[in-house]
Amino acid sequence: MNPTIILIGPLGAGKSTVGRLLAEKLALPFCSVDAVRGQYYQKVGYDETVAAQIAASGQGIRRVLRYSQPFEARMVEMVLAEHHGVIDFGASNSVYDDEALLARVERALAPYPQVILLRPSPDAAESTAILKSRLVRMLTAAGREFNDELFVLNDYFVQHPANRRLAKRVVYTKDKTPEQICAELVQIVA
C-alpha cells in the first residue's frame, strides 16, 4: 500500500492549504507541484519562450496549456518517482485533452490509492462560482492582476472529465474550513 496522498482539483480548491495541514497532521513531507514546476520543466525540455510566444500571439491560455500538457505528463511521472507524503498537484496536472497523455498519467497514478479530488460541490456551476469568488479574494489580497480568462480556464478545469477519471475519491469542500477538510481527509486515509 502506497502511503502517498495526492490532491487534485481546480484552481482555488484548497489543495495547497489543505495539503500543508494534512502533511503536518500526518507528519509527512509536503510537495506542491506548482512550487517545483520550474525545475522539472527544465528537466523535461519545456520552452518558456515558446509558451510566451503562444500567449503573446493571442491564442490564449488554453493553447499554452495544450503546449504544456506533454511536459506536464512527464513531470507528473518524475514528481511521483521523487516525492512522497502529501503531493498537491497543480490544477493543470490532472487535466489532459489528449487521451494518450491522460492514460499515461492514469498509469502513473495507478499505484496510489489516495488520489483525492477537492471540489466545492457536485454541481459544476456552483463549484465554478465558489472558486471564482475565492480566487478574486485571494488574488486581490495578494495584489495580483487577473482577468476573466483565468475564470474561463478554471471552469474548464471544473468541467473536465479527467479529474473524475483520475480521482479515486472526491471530497466536497463547500462551507468547510481547511481544518475541517483536513480532518475529513485524515479519516479517509486512516
Image (cartoon, grey):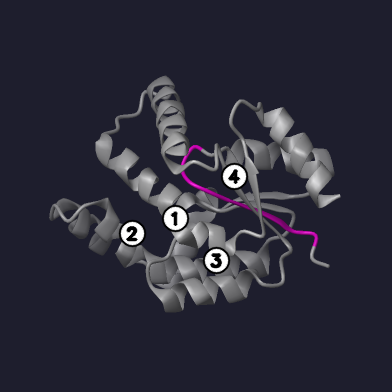
171 or 27, nearer to the observer: 171
In this rendering, would 138 be left or right of 187?
A: left
Q: Which residue is mark 2?
A: 65
Q: Residue furthest left?
A: 57
Secondary structure mostly seen in the magenta stretch:
loop
Query: Helix, strand or loop at disc 1?
Result: helix
Q: Nearer the viewer, mark 3 or mark 4?
A: 4
Q: Is residue 42 in view from this perspective? A: no
Q: Which residue is mark 4?
A: 118
> Gap in Å between the C-alphas at discs 2 and 4?
21 Å
Q: Amino acid at mark 1?
A: Ser
Q: Nearer the viewer, mark 4 or mark 1?
A: 4
Q: Which residue is mark 3?
A: 76
57 or 94, nearer to the observer: 94
Query: Helix, strand or loop at disc 4?
Result: strand
Q: Is residue 107 above or below residue 52?
A: below
Q: Quadrant of the N terminus?
A: bottom right
Q: Residue at x 33, y 47 (%)?
A: 153
Q: Which comes sooner in the sequence, label 3 or label 4?
A: 3
Q: Which residue is mark 1?
A: 92
10 Å crowding of disc 1: few (<14), some (14-19), many (20+): many
Q: Amino acid at mark 3?
A: Val
Q: Is residue 122 magenta?
A: no
Q: Are marks 4 and 1 in contact (CB under 8 Å)?
A: no
Q: Which range of residues does the magenta coloring cover? A: 3-12
Q: Which comes sooner in the sequence, label 2 or label 4?
A: 2
Q: Are marks 1 and 2 in contact (CB under 8 Å)?
A: yes
